Amino acid sequence: METRSLPDLARVQRRTVAVLGSGTALSGLGVTIGITLGGLLARDVAGSDSASGLGQTAGVLGAAVLAVPLARISDRSGRRAGLAAGFAVAVVGAVVTVVAAALSSLPLLMAGLFAFGAATACGLQARYAAADLAAPERRGRDLSLVVWATTIGSVLGPNLAGPGADLGVRLGLPSLGGGFALSAAVFLLVAALFLGLLRPDPLLLARRLRDGDGPAPTRPPRATRTALTAVWASPGGRLGLTAVVVSHAVMVGVMVMTPVHMGHAGGHEGTTLRLIGLVISVHVAGMYLFSPLVGWLADRLGRRAVVALAAVLLLAAAALSGTAGPEDAGQLGAGLFLLGLGWSCGLVAGSTLVTESVGPQLRPTAQGGADLLMGLGAALAGVVGGPLLTLGGFGLVSGVSAALVVPLVVVWVLGRAPGGSAAPVVAPQQDQRQQQADRDADLQHRVEG
Protein backbone atom coordinates (compact mmCIF):
# COMPACT_ATOMS: atom_id res chain seq x y z
CA MET A 1 0.00 0.00 0.00
CA GLU A 2 1.23 3.46 -0.80
CA THR A 3 2.30 5.34 2.32
CA ARG A 4 0.85 8.76 2.93
CA SER A 5 2.17 11.05 5.67
CA LEU A 6 0.32 13.33 8.01
CA PRO A 7 1.31 16.48 6.04
CA ASP A 8 -0.70 14.93 3.16
CA LEU A 9 -3.74 14.90 5.44
CA ALA A 10 -3.13 18.54 6.35
CA ARG A 11 -2.95 19.39 2.66
CA VAL A 12 -6.22 17.57 2.01
CA GLN A 13 -7.85 19.63 4.77
CA ARG A 14 -6.56 22.91 3.33
CA ARG A 15 -7.87 21.96 -0.10
CA THR A 16 -11.21 20.91 1.38
CA VAL A 17 -11.64 24.22 3.19
CA ALA A 18 -10.66 26.12 0.02
CA VAL A 19 -13.21 24.29 -2.14
CA LEU A 20 -15.94 24.62 0.47
CA GLY A 21 -15.13 28.29 0.90
CA SER A 22 -15.27 28.95 -2.84
CA GLY A 23 -18.62 27.22 -3.18
CA THR A 24 -20.22 28.95 -0.22
CA ALA A 25 -18.92 32.31 -1.44
CA LEU A 26 -20.80 31.82 -4.70
CA SER A 27 -23.89 30.34 -3.09
CA GLY A 28 -24.12 33.27 -0.68
CA LEU A 29 -24.74 35.54 -3.64
CA GLY A 30 -27.74 33.51 -4.79
CA VAL A 31 -29.15 32.97 -1.31
CA THR A 32 -29.12 36.61 -0.27
CA ILE A 33 -30.86 37.70 -3.46
CA GLY A 34 -33.68 35.44 -2.32
CA ILE A 35 -33.56 36.83 1.23
CA THR A 36 -33.88 40.35 -0.11
CA LEU A 37 -36.65 39.67 -2.61
CA GLY A 38 -38.61 36.73 -1.22
CA GLY A 39 -40.75 38.67 1.25
CA LEU A 40 -41.36 41.50 -1.19
CA LEU A 41 -42.39 39.06 -3.92
CA ALA A 42 -44.80 37.26 -1.58
CA ARG A 43 -46.29 40.60 -0.55
CA ASP A 44 -46.81 41.62 -4.17
CA VAL A 45 -48.33 38.28 -5.20
CA ALA A 46 -50.62 38.07 -2.15
CA GLY A 47 -51.32 41.80 -1.94
CA SER A 48 -50.87 41.92 1.85
CA ASP A 49 -48.11 42.80 4.33
CA SER A 50 -49.34 39.94 6.52
CA ALA A 51 -48.33 37.50 3.78
CA SER A 52 -44.85 38.99 3.42
CA GLY A 53 -43.45 36.71 6.09
CA LEU A 54 -44.72 33.67 4.21
CA GLY A 55 -42.13 34.02 1.47
CA GLN A 56 -39.17 33.98 3.82
CA THR A 57 -40.82 31.35 6.01
CA ALA A 58 -41.20 29.01 3.03
CA GLY A 59 -37.46 29.33 2.31
CA VAL A 60 -36.49 28.85 5.96
CA LEU A 61 -38.85 25.88 6.32
CA GLY A 62 -37.42 24.36 3.16
CA ALA A 63 -33.90 24.72 4.56
CA ALA A 64 -35.03 23.00 7.77
CA VAL A 65 -36.95 20.11 6.25
CA LEU A 66 -34.48 19.45 3.45
CA ALA A 67 -31.53 19.43 5.87
CA VAL A 68 -32.43 15.91 7.02
CA PRO A 69 -32.58 14.12 3.62
CA LEU A 70 -29.48 16.00 2.47
CA ALA A 71 -27.67 14.87 5.64
CA ARG A 72 -28.78 11.30 4.90
CA ILE A 73 -27.32 11.52 1.40
CA SER A 74 -24.06 12.76 2.93
CA ASP A 75 -24.19 9.97 5.49
CA ARG A 76 -24.52 7.31 2.79
CA SER A 77 -22.49 8.78 -0.07
CA GLY A 78 -20.36 11.60 1.37
CA ARG A 79 -20.45 15.37 1.60
CA ARG A 80 -19.85 15.85 -2.13
CA ALA A 81 -23.04 14.01 -3.08
CA GLY A 82 -25.14 15.70 -0.40
CA LEU A 83 -24.04 19.23 -1.26
CA ALA A 84 -24.37 18.76 -5.04
CA ALA A 85 -27.85 17.26 -4.65
CA GLY A 86 -28.96 20.15 -2.46
CA PHE A 87 -27.85 22.81 -4.91
CA ALA A 88 -29.57 20.93 -7.75
CA VAL A 89 -32.83 21.14 -5.76
CA ALA A 90 -32.19 24.87 -5.21
CA VAL A 91 -31.85 25.40 -8.99
CA VAL A 92 -35.29 23.84 -9.48
CA GLY A 93 -36.67 26.04 -6.68
CA ALA A 94 -35.31 29.23 -8.23
CA VAL A 95 -36.79 28.36 -11.63
CA VAL A 96 -40.18 27.56 -10.09
CA THR A 97 -40.08 30.89 -8.23
CA VAL A 98 -39.50 32.75 -11.49
CA VAL A 99 -42.47 30.96 -13.05
CA ALA A 100 -44.60 31.75 -9.99
CA ALA A 101 -43.72 35.43 -10.28
CA ALA A 102 -44.75 35.42 -13.94
CA LEU A 103 -48.05 33.69 -13.16
CA SER A 104 -48.63 35.60 -9.90
CA SER A 105 -49.34 32.28 -8.17
CA LEU A 106 -48.88 32.24 -4.40
CA PRO A 107 -49.01 28.41 -3.97
CA LEU A 108 -46.42 27.95 -6.72
CA LEU A 109 -44.31 30.70 -5.16
CA MET A 110 -44.35 28.93 -1.79
CA ALA A 111 -43.30 25.66 -3.44
CA GLY A 112 -40.47 27.37 -5.31
CA LEU A 113 -39.15 29.19 -2.25
CA PHE A 114 -39.38 25.97 -0.22
CA ALA A 115 -37.09 24.20 -2.69
CA PHE A 116 -34.93 27.35 -2.90
CA GLY A 117 -34.21 26.82 0.80
CA ALA A 118 -32.05 23.81 -0.08
CA ALA A 119 -29.27 26.29 -0.90
CA THR A 120 -29.38 27.60 2.66
CA ALA A 121 -29.33 24.05 4.00
CA CYS A 122 -26.25 23.28 1.90
CA GLY A 123 -24.50 26.44 3.01
CA LEU A 124 -25.04 25.44 6.62
CA GLN A 125 -23.93 21.84 6.07
CA ALA A 126 -20.78 22.98 4.29
CA ARG A 127 -19.50 24.38 7.61
CA TYR A 128 -19.73 20.90 9.12
CA ALA A 129 -17.82 19.42 6.19
CA ALA A 130 -14.93 21.74 7.08
CA ALA A 131 -14.76 20.11 10.53
CA ASP A 132 -14.61 16.49 9.33
CA LEU A 133 -10.80 16.38 9.04
CA ALA A 134 -9.95 19.35 11.28
CA ALA A 135 -7.64 19.02 14.27
CA PRO A 136 -9.53 19.58 17.57
CA GLU A 137 -7.74 22.82 18.41
CA ARG A 138 -8.49 24.22 14.94
CA ARG A 139 -12.03 22.92 14.53
CA GLY A 140 -13.72 26.22 15.39
CA ARG A 141 -11.45 28.20 13.08
CA ASP A 142 -11.76 25.85 10.08
CA LEU A 143 -15.52 25.80 10.47
CA SER A 144 -15.62 29.58 10.75
CA LEU A 145 -13.50 30.06 7.61
CA VAL A 146 -16.22 28.44 5.50
CA VAL A 147 -18.83 30.60 7.24
CA TRP A 148 -16.66 33.65 6.51
CA ALA A 149 -16.37 32.80 2.81
CA THR A 150 -20.10 33.39 2.48
CA THR A 151 -19.35 37.09 3.06
CA ILE A 152 -18.07 37.54 -0.48
CA GLY A 153 -21.29 36.60 -2.22
CA SER A 154 -23.68 37.54 0.55
CA VAL A 155 -22.64 41.18 0.75
CA LEU A 156 -22.81 41.52 -3.02
CA GLY A 157 -26.08 39.60 -3.40
CA PRO A 158 -28.57 42.11 -1.90
CA ASN A 159 -27.11 44.89 -4.05
CA LEU A 160 -27.94 42.86 -7.15
CA ALA A 161 -31.65 43.17 -6.34
CA GLY A 162 -31.88 46.30 -8.47
CA PRO A 163 -29.93 44.91 -11.48
CA GLY A 164 -31.88 41.66 -11.09
CA ALA A 165 -35.11 43.63 -11.36
CA ASP A 166 -33.84 45.23 -14.58
CA LEU A 167 -32.99 41.77 -15.91
CA GLY A 168 -36.48 40.57 -15.08
CA VAL A 169 -38.01 43.42 -17.05
CA ARG A 170 -35.79 42.66 -20.05
CA LEU A 171 -36.86 39.01 -19.91
CA GLY A 172 -40.52 40.00 -19.79
CA LEU A 173 -40.89 38.90 -16.15
CA PRO A 174 -42.13 40.77 -13.09
CA SER A 175 -39.18 42.81 -11.85
CA LEU A 176 -38.78 40.88 -8.58
CA GLY A 177 -38.50 37.58 -10.48
CA GLY A 178 -35.28 38.54 -12.28
CA GLY A 179 -33.08 38.09 -9.22
CA PHE A 180 -34.13 34.45 -8.87
CA ALA A 181 -33.02 33.79 -12.46
CA LEU A 182 -29.54 34.93 -11.39
CA SER A 183 -29.72 32.66 -8.35
CA ALA A 184 -30.54 29.61 -10.51
CA ALA A 185 -27.40 30.17 -12.61
CA VAL A 186 -25.23 30.60 -9.52
CA PHE A 187 -26.53 27.43 -7.82
CA LEU A 188 -25.93 25.38 -10.96
CA LEU A 189 -22.30 26.56 -10.98
CA VAL A 190 -21.85 25.69 -7.29
CA ALA A 191 -23.24 22.17 -7.77
CA ALA A 192 -20.74 21.57 -10.58
CA LEU A 193 -17.90 22.97 -8.44
CA PHE A 194 -18.55 20.58 -5.55
CA LEU A 195 -19.04 17.57 -7.84
CA GLY A 196 -15.78 18.22 -9.62
CA LEU A 197 -13.42 19.45 -6.91
CA LEU A 198 -14.49 18.17 -3.48
CA ARG A 199 -12.17 15.17 -3.71
CA PRO A 200 -11.35 13.20 -1.63
CA ASP A 201 -14.63 13.43 0.21
CA PRO A 202 -13.82 14.74 3.73
CA LEU A 203 -16.45 12.72 5.60
CA LEU A 204 -15.68 9.42 3.87
CA LEU A 205 -11.95 9.96 4.38
CA ALA A 206 -12.42 10.78 8.06
CA ARG A 207 -14.40 7.59 8.54
CA ARG A 208 -11.87 5.51 6.64
CA LEU A 209 -9.00 6.87 8.72
CA ARG A 210 -10.91 6.19 11.91
CA ASP A 211 -12.47 2.81 11.14
CA GLY A 212 -10.34 1.35 8.36
CA ASP A 213 -11.95 -0.47 5.47
CA GLY A 214 -14.47 -2.42 7.53
CA PRO A 215 -18.15 -2.51 6.67
CA ALA A 216 -20.12 0.68 7.21
CA PRO A 217 -22.21 0.66 10.40
CA THR A 218 -25.91 -0.01 10.00
CA ARG A 219 -28.15 2.99 10.33
CA PRO A 220 -30.29 2.73 13.49
CA PRO A 221 -34.04 3.26 13.28
CA ARG A 222 -35.13 6.82 13.98
CA ALA A 223 -31.53 7.84 13.44
CA THR A 224 -32.16 11.60 13.66
CA ARG A 225 -33.88 11.28 17.02
CA THR A 226 -31.13 8.95 18.28
CA ALA A 227 -28.41 11.37 17.20
CA LEU A 228 -30.12 14.41 18.71
CA THR A 229 -30.64 12.50 21.96
CA ALA A 230 -26.90 11.81 22.04
CA VAL A 231 -26.18 15.52 21.47
CA TRP A 232 -28.60 16.59 24.21
CA ALA A 233 -27.11 14.09 26.68
CA SER A 234 -23.89 16.09 27.02
CA PRO A 235 -23.79 19.58 28.59
CA GLY A 236 -21.74 20.93 25.68
CA GLY A 237 -24.07 19.45 23.08
CA ARG A 238 -27.11 20.80 24.92
CA LEU A 239 -25.68 24.31 24.97
CA GLY A 240 -24.57 24.09 21.35
CA LEU A 241 -27.96 22.89 20.11
CA THR A 242 -29.78 25.62 22.02
CA ALA A 243 -27.34 28.25 20.75
CA VAL A 244 -27.80 27.45 17.06
CA VAL A 245 -31.59 27.19 17.34
CA VAL A 246 -32.05 30.42 19.29
CA SER A 247 -29.51 32.45 17.30
CA HIS A 248 -31.07 31.46 13.99
CA ALA A 249 -34.64 32.06 15.15
CA VAL A 250 -33.86 35.53 16.52
CA MET A 251 -31.89 36.48 13.42
CA VAL A 252 -34.62 35.39 11.02
CA GLY A 253 -37.41 36.87 13.16
CA VAL A 254 -35.93 40.37 12.92
CA MET A 255 -34.26 40.18 9.52
CA VAL A 256 -37.16 38.97 7.38
CA MET A 257 -39.44 41.80 8.48
CA THR A 258 -36.83 44.53 8.01
CA PRO A 259 -37.37 44.97 4.22
CA VAL A 260 -41.15 45.14 4.74
CA HIS A 261 -40.71 47.64 7.60
CA MET A 262 -38.44 49.81 5.43
CA GLY A 263 -40.90 49.56 2.56
CA HIS A 264 -43.32 51.70 4.59
CA ALA A 265 -40.96 54.68 4.37
CA GLY A 266 -42.33 55.70 0.99
CA GLY A 267 -40.30 57.32 -1.76
CA HIS A 268 -39.17 56.00 -5.11
CA GLU A 269 -39.28 52.19 -5.36
CA GLY A 270 -35.79 51.95 -6.84
CA THR A 271 -34.29 54.08 -4.07
CA THR A 272 -36.11 52.07 -1.41
CA LEU A 273 -34.86 48.78 -2.88
CA ARG A 274 -31.29 50.08 -2.88
CA LEU A 275 -31.54 51.20 0.76
CA ILE A 276 -33.00 47.84 1.71
CA GLY A 277 -30.17 46.12 -0.15
CA LEU A 278 -27.60 48.25 1.66
CA VAL A 279 -29.05 47.47 5.11
CA ILE A 280 -29.23 43.74 4.34
CA SER A 281 -25.63 43.88 3.07
CA VAL A 282 -24.51 45.39 6.38
CA HIS A 283 -26.44 42.68 8.20
CA VAL A 284 -24.82 39.94 6.12
CA ALA A 285 -21.40 41.47 6.76
CA GLY A 286 -22.10 41.13 10.49
CA MET A 287 -23.11 37.51 9.95
CA TYR A 288 -20.02 36.41 8.06
CA LEU A 289 -17.22 38.98 7.95
CA PHE A 290 -15.90 38.43 11.47
CA SER A 291 -16.51 34.69 11.67
CA PRO A 292 -12.75 33.81 11.59
CA LEU A 293 -12.30 36.00 14.66
CA VAL A 294 -15.33 34.33 16.24
CA GLY A 295 -13.84 30.91 15.51
CA TRP A 296 -10.49 31.94 16.98
CA LEU A 297 -12.22 33.20 20.12
CA ALA A 298 -14.18 29.96 20.39
CA ASP A 299 -10.93 27.96 20.24
CA ARG A 300 -9.00 30.26 22.61
CA LEU A 301 -11.56 31.49 25.15
CA GLY A 302 -13.94 28.56 24.98
CA ARG A 303 -17.26 27.85 23.32
CA ARG A 304 -19.29 28.90 26.36
CA ALA A 305 -17.82 32.40 26.42
CA VAL A 306 -18.69 32.97 22.76
CA VAL A 307 -22.23 31.67 23.28
CA ALA A 308 -22.64 34.20 26.12
CA LEU A 309 -21.42 36.96 23.80
CA ALA A 310 -24.00 35.83 21.23
CA ALA A 311 -26.83 36.29 23.74
CA VAL A 312 -25.69 39.82 24.63
CA LEU A 313 -25.37 40.87 20.98
CA LEU A 314 -28.78 39.46 20.01
CA LEU A 315 -30.50 41.38 22.81
CA ALA A 316 -28.70 44.61 21.89
CA ALA A 317 -29.62 44.15 18.23
CA ALA A 318 -33.31 43.65 18.98
CA ALA A 319 -33.37 46.79 21.14
CA LEU A 320 -31.61 48.95 18.55
CA SER A 321 -33.62 47.69 15.56
CA GLY A 322 -36.96 47.71 17.33
CA THR A 323 -36.75 51.42 18.12
CA ALA A 324 -35.92 52.47 14.53
CA GLY A 325 -38.49 53.94 12.16
CA PRO A 326 -38.87 52.80 8.53
CA GLU A 327 -36.77 55.74 7.33
CA ASP A 328 -33.95 55.25 9.90
CA ALA A 329 -31.67 53.25 7.59
CA GLY A 330 -28.57 54.07 9.68
CA GLN A 331 -30.02 52.78 12.94
CA LEU A 332 -31.53 49.75 11.23
CA GLY A 333 -28.18 49.01 9.61
CA ALA A 334 -26.40 49.21 12.99
CA GLY A 335 -29.02 46.99 14.64
CA LEU A 336 -28.88 44.41 11.89
CA PHE A 337 -25.08 44.41 11.96
CA LEU A 338 -25.19 43.46 15.66
CA LEU A 339 -27.88 40.91 14.85
CA GLY A 340 -25.62 39.28 12.27
CA LEU A 341 -22.63 39.30 14.62
CA GLY A 342 -24.67 37.68 17.39
CA TRP A 343 -25.85 35.03 14.94
CA SER A 344 -22.24 34.35 13.93
CA CYS A 345 -21.17 33.85 17.55
CA GLY A 346 -24.07 31.52 18.26
CA LEU A 347 -23.69 29.55 15.04
CA VAL A 348 -19.91 29.04 15.09
CA ALA A 349 -19.59 28.21 18.79
CA GLY A 350 -22.83 26.22 18.86
CA SER A 351 -22.02 24.22 15.72
CA THR A 352 -18.59 23.37 17.10
CA LEU A 353 -20.17 22.12 20.33
CA VAL A 354 -22.68 19.98 18.42
CA THR A 355 -19.88 18.50 16.30
CA GLU A 356 -17.75 17.69 19.35
CA SER A 357 -20.60 16.07 21.28
CA VAL A 358 -20.82 12.94 19.07
CA GLY A 359 -18.46 10.72 17.08
CA PRO A 360 -17.92 10.72 13.28
CA GLN A 361 -20.53 8.03 12.62
CA LEU A 362 -23.31 10.06 14.22
CA ARG A 363 -22.14 13.50 13.14
CA PRO A 364 -23.92 13.92 9.77
CA THR A 365 -27.23 12.78 11.25
CA ALA A 366 -26.81 14.91 14.38
CA GLN A 367 -25.80 17.91 12.29
CA GLY A 368 -28.76 17.47 9.96
CA GLY A 369 -31.06 17.17 12.97
CA ALA A 370 -29.60 20.32 14.51
CA ASP A 371 -30.15 22.20 11.25
CA LEU A 372 -33.71 20.86 11.13
CA LEU A 373 -34.45 22.24 14.61
CA MET A 374 -32.82 25.59 13.95
CA GLY A 375 -34.70 25.87 10.67
CA LEU A 376 -38.04 25.01 12.26
CA GLY A 377 -37.42 27.60 14.98
CA ALA A 378 -36.58 30.21 12.37
CA ALA A 379 -39.60 29.25 10.26
CA LEU A 380 -41.88 29.78 13.25
CA ALA A 381 -40.27 33.16 13.90
CA GLY A 382 -40.75 34.10 10.26
CA VAL A 383 -44.36 32.99 9.97
CA VAL A 384 -45.49 35.05 12.96
CA GLY A 385 -43.48 38.08 11.81
CA GLY A 386 -46.10 39.35 9.37
CA PRO A 387 -49.03 39.21 11.82
CA LEU A 388 -46.87 40.75 14.57
CA LEU A 389 -45.85 43.58 12.24
CA THR A 390 -49.49 44.22 11.38
CA LEU A 391 -50.57 44.02 15.02
CA GLY A 392 -47.90 46.07 16.80
CA GLY A 393 -45.29 47.22 14.31
CA PHE A 394 -41.60 46.42 14.04
CA GLY A 395 -41.06 47.10 17.74
CA LEU A 396 -43.29 44.16 18.63
CA VAL A 397 -41.46 41.92 16.14
CA SER A 398 -38.13 42.81 17.75
CA GLY A 399 -39.46 42.43 21.30
CA VAL A 400 -40.81 38.94 20.69
CA SER A 401 -37.55 37.98 18.99
CA ALA A 402 -35.57 39.21 22.01
CA ALA A 403 -37.71 37.03 24.29
CA LEU A 404 -36.45 33.97 22.42
CA VAL A 405 -32.98 34.53 23.95
CA VAL A 406 -34.31 33.56 27.40
CA PRO A 407 -34.04 29.76 26.85
CA LEU A 408 -30.41 30.18 25.78
CA VAL A 409 -29.61 32.13 28.94
CA VAL A 410 -31.31 29.43 31.06
CA VAL A 411 -29.33 26.59 29.47
CA TRP A 412 -26.10 28.58 29.79
CA VAL A 413 -26.69 29.31 33.49
CA LEU A 414 -27.69 25.71 34.27
CA GLY A 415 -24.50 24.53 32.63
CA ARG A 416 -22.52 26.59 35.14
CA ALA A 417 -24.50 25.42 38.17
CA PRO A 418 -22.92 22.79 40.47
CA GLY A 419 -23.52 19.43 38.84
CA GLY A 420 -24.68 21.11 35.63
CA SER A 421 -21.53 20.20 33.71
CA ALA A 422 -19.45 17.17 34.45
CA ALA A 423 -16.56 18.40 32.33
CA PRO A 424 -15.40 21.66 30.80
CA VAL A 425 -16.84 22.39 27.37
CA VAL A 426 -13.37 22.99 25.94
CA ALA A 427 -10.41 21.02 27.26
CA PRO A 428 -7.37 22.95 28.54
CA GLN A 429 -4.76 23.67 25.89
CA GLN A 430 -2.33 21.09 27.25
CA ASP A 431 -5.00 18.37 27.15
CA GLN A 432 -5.87 19.38 23.61
CA ARG A 433 -2.23 18.98 22.56
CA GLN A 434 -2.18 15.49 24.09
CA GLN A 435 -5.45 14.64 22.34
CA GLN A 436 -3.99 15.81 19.06
CA ALA A 437 -0.82 13.79 19.58
CA ASP A 438 -2.91 10.67 20.22
CA ARG A 439 -5.05 11.45 17.18
CA ASP A 440 -2.01 11.97 14.93
CA ALA A 441 -0.47 8.70 16.08
CA ASP A 442 -3.68 6.81 15.39
CA LEU A 443 -4.12 8.41 11.97
CA GLN A 444 -0.48 7.66 11.06
CA HIS A 445 -1.01 4.02 11.94
CA ARG A 446 -4.19 3.80 9.84
CA VAL A 447 -2.87 5.71 6.82
CA GLU A 448 0.35 3.71 6.66
CA GLY A 449 -1.33 0.40 7.59
Image (cartoon, helix red, strand yellow):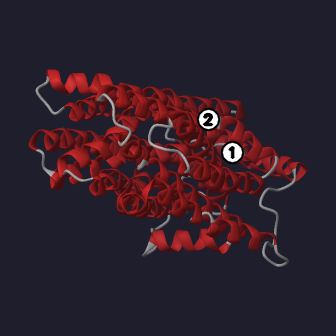
- Assign a secondary structure to mark 1: helix
Query: Dot 2 surroundings within 10 Å: few (below 14), some, or many (20 or more)?
Result: many
Depth check: give the residue in front, 174 or 389: 389
Depth check: give the residue in front, 399 or 240: 399
The amino acid on which the numbered mark 1 sits, given as a three-letter code, is Gly
The amino acid on which the numbered mark 2 sits, given as a three-letter code, is Leu
Q: Quadrant of the N terminus?
A: top right
Decide if residue 73 is on the left or right side of residue 332: left
User: Residue 376, located in which quarter of the rendered image?
Assistant: bottom left
User: Residue 390, located in which quarter of the rendered image?
Assistant: bottom left
| Percent x, y of residue 66 | 35, 56
Furthest toward the bottom, the residue is 419
Q: Which residue: 52% across, 64% down?
A: 400
Label whose residue precedes the other's in the sequence (1 or 2): 1
Q: Is residue 282 above or below residue 373?
A: above
Decide if residue 370 is on the left or right side of residue 46: right
| Percent x, y of residue 395 | 50, 56
- Assign a secondary structure to mark 2: helix
Residue designated by label 2: 145
Decide if residue 439 is on the left or right side of residue 128: right
Q: Is residue 50 above or below residue 179?
A: below
Does residue 38 appear anywhere in the picture? Answer: yes
Q: Is residue 240 above or below residue 268?
A: below
Q: Which residue: 46% across, 53% down?
A: 394
Does residue 366 appear anywhere in the picture? Answer: no
Marking on residue 415: none
Marking on residue 140: 1
How far is mark 1 from mark 2, CA to CA? 9 Å
